Image: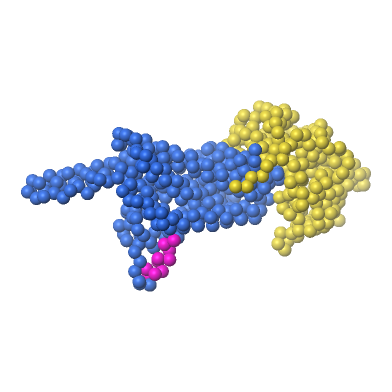
Amino acid sequence: MPSSSMPTVTSLSAAHVPGTDPVVQLDGLSHSYGDIEALHALDLTIPEGEIFGFLGHNGAGKTTTLHVLTTLITPTAGSARVCGFDVVRERLEVQRRIGYLPENVRLYDSLTARENLRFFAQLSGVEDIPAAIDRTLGFLDAHDLADRRVGTFSKGMRQRIGIAQAILHEPRVLFLDEPTSGLDPMGVRQLRETVVRLNAELGITIFMNTHLLSEVARVCTTIGVLAEGELIYHDTLASTLARFPDEASLEDIYVRLEDR
Amino acid sequence: MSTTIVVARQQLRSLARSRTFVLMLGILLVMTGLSGFIGWSSHATIIRVYDQTVQTLTAAGKAAPPNPFASKPRLSLLNNMIIYIPLIGSLLAIVIGQRSVTDDRQAGVTRVIFSRPVGRSSYFWGKLAGSAFAGVAIMIACLGLSVVGLGLINQGLPTGSELVRLALFYALSGTYLFLFVLVGMVAALLTRSESLGLFAGVAVWVLVTFATPQFTSGLRPVASLNPVNDPVATSGSPFFKVTSKAKPFAVNEQYKALSTRILTVGSRLQPATSAGQLAPIAAFLLALGAWAHLLVRRQDFSEDTARD
């Protein structure tokens, strides 16, 4: 019976120098599902330390891009690099450096939050698992949830434990797919604060697919707009707001970009 | 700790908290515990009928034939297990195999798992190891219950030879049940819907347990009621020529015939015959295992939402 040895994780965040290589780099990235082209020749570079908001309507290709970057699917053309490693040829190196929170993650209902986290920590090769769990739960102010069964959690609580599993192994980049989906206003606010703290205090680069333009305006440093598989806009939030001075909000800018 | 062990342990943890699994396991263990008493009860009834017949014949001045059931092997009291394992055990095995796939899907975590440094083969072997461990533990529990049951009925522990045969029987049963673990796993991997996956597994179980025997020992009506040692004797007619082709696929019949021979201490185990009856089970195990492995390697785990 073959069994792969686990990679060990000590402290990835301490091992890298911020602000050097791009964390995400797409060159002519395309992906097709049969005859349907979901992504067409995407070129995108995201430097380290950014909070990147990836905007686009349903079916634009945001989740497909995320699946390529998290090594879940193989692109049909072009290349994608995460933390300097190719997502196809150096899959394991990419997987060691990323955290991922899919949309609607539910975790194992019958297990406690701590048991769930222990499982994902073991898969990621975290060395001192109890300490990593305590540290992560402390950071997210979620110690009170540790020994409760996930099946009893609200959507907001699940999301906190979902983020905990994604950052337990101290990734350099965190991919979030529609993280505010289904959350109440308090949950949205908590998540926004968490994202900002993850970036500011742990130095984690954030790549966030979202529909909520108000959240993008409050949290993100850079935005990209995807329409029908093509990247139609990419710039910093500050430059974007300066470039469209006549528009009252980011929503107006987004509508104008989509209309172009 | 290797990925295989982490995945296997997680599967066992999840399984232990699954209500369906616990319920079916409970039924199997209760029936295993009762099987010795049910066998003893029917045996005692037959002996009483014989004794009354002897009294009637003696009163009429006729000679009574010797009791044909007096020398019945003690292990044959457990013959009911040859029915319970394919009926209850197989369904339990399908649940184990199916849950090994659907647990992660229901939790929506397969995407997270495969965004971690987890190889698909390691994941597959982990699931298989978890299922195998659960199967071995269940068979050991059944063996223990059978030993206790026989000990209570016979007021003494089984002999060494009986213990070896019991262990052989449960090893064979575990192997047979693992076929259904793989059936459950393959069915779940082929379907996105949990209920459809379970239905497909149960459909295969019905085919193996009830349909294929109809083309083998089922052609002799008595064989439907009692496990028989020899599969159907084929004749030269076209019907028998066609139905005889189904014999290797009737793994349930192979299991029953071999189990009957194991539990009947008087009968010798012929290595050549036993190997011939084990071969179809082993062949199906290998084929289903390879299929499940291929499906895991090719599965699109970016779509892990459970439907239903």
Can residue B189 be seen in this snapshot? Answer: yes
- Please give left or right for residue B156 compared with residue B63 in the image: right
Q: Residue visible at 49% across and 43% down?
A: B135
Q: Colour of chain B?
A: blue
Q: Colour of chain A?
A: yellow
Q: Is residue B179 magenta?
A: no
Instruction: Look at the magenta stretch and give its main secondary structure.
Output: helix
B153 up-or-down from B236: above or below: above
Q: Is residue B240 magenta?
A: yes
**Residue B275 in the image: x percent, y percent?**
44, 55
**Residue A81 in the image: x percent, y percent?**
81, 49
- Please give left or right for residue A204 compared with residue B152 in the image: right
Q: Which residues are magenta?
A: B239-248
- Please give left or right for residue A253 compared with residue B35 in the image: right
Can residue A225 be seen in this snapshot? Answer: no
Q: Residue visible at 68% across and 32% down?
A: A129
Quarter occupied by the N terminus of chain B: top right
**Residue A33 in the image: x percent, y percent?**
71, 59
- Please give left or right for residue A212 compared with residue B214 in the image: right
Q: Residue visible at 68% across and 27% down?
A: A143
Question: Of residues B48 and B101, which is closer to you in this image?
Answer: B48
Question: Of residues B262 and B131, which is closer to you in this image?
Answer: B262
